[in-house]
Amino acid sequence: MKPAWDKLMAAYKDHKTTLVADVDCTAGGKALCETVGVQGFPTIKYGDPSDLEDYEGGRDFDDLKKFADGLGPLCSPKNLDLCSAEKKKQIQEYMAMDAKKLEEFVSSKEEEMKKISSDFDKFVEGLQKQYEDGNKKKDEGIKAIKESGLGLAKAVRASLKGKDEL
């Protein structure tokens, strides 16, 4: 993916509204990556810098370029003209909140998201345990069947078929 990404960065080098860049999350960019929620590599993020979204599309140049071509300024407090009436109203409500209340609101929503992610992780752990238990039971069952004489029975069957064919 790196060559495709480098090519995309070159294609958008002097773009007026779209920044295509990379960050080394293992070195100087580690703090930034933690702030925006990078959990694995490579990760592609897009959108408003204060609320980046995960890119889930293709990783070759053509897919990346097609996606990037559709990017541009988004609805935000700095770009109200790009907002629907509903989003403008929502922004106005948040702007009318005092700083403490807004911080509490954002923190509570972030905690809700963390809980959903944590609950999902626990669910996946449970599935993993079920898979491991089921796989162990399957392997033990197959081993027991083989050890009960299946191999010898197959050998006898094959030798009998050979006699019938002569």
Image: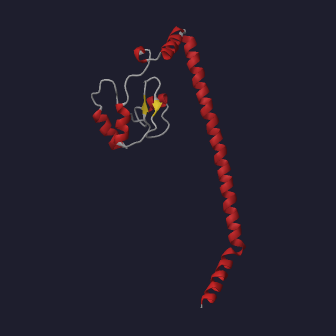
Residue 163 drawn at (x, y percent):
63, 89
In the image, 96: left or right of 143?
left
Residue 86 drawn at (x, y percent):
51, 16
Q: Quadrant of the N terminus?
A: top left
Toward the bottom, the furthest residue is: 166
Q: Nearer the viewer, residue 146 or 67?
A: 67
Answer yes or no: is residue 78 visible: no
**At x 46% / y 28%, what residue is drawn?**
52
**At x 37% / y 30%, what residue is drawn?**
70
Q: Quadrant of the C terminus?
A: bottom right
**At x 32% / y 39%, what residue is drawn?**
6
Answer yes or no: is residue 153 visible: yes
Figure check: 145 above or below 38: below
Q: Quadrant of residue 153?
A: bottom right
Figure check: 92 above or below 63: above
Residue 110 drawn at (x, y percent):
57, 24
In the image, 145: left or right of 165?
right
**At x 28% / y 34%, what residue is drawn?**
11
Q: Nearer the viewer, residue 71 or 8?
A: 71
Asked which colour scheme the image uses, the reply is: secondary structure
Residue 16 drawn at (x, y percent):
30, 24
Number of numbered labels in the structure image = 0
Q: Nearer the viewer, residue 24 or 38?
A: 38
Figure check: 155 above or below 102: below
In the image, 44: left or right of 4?
right
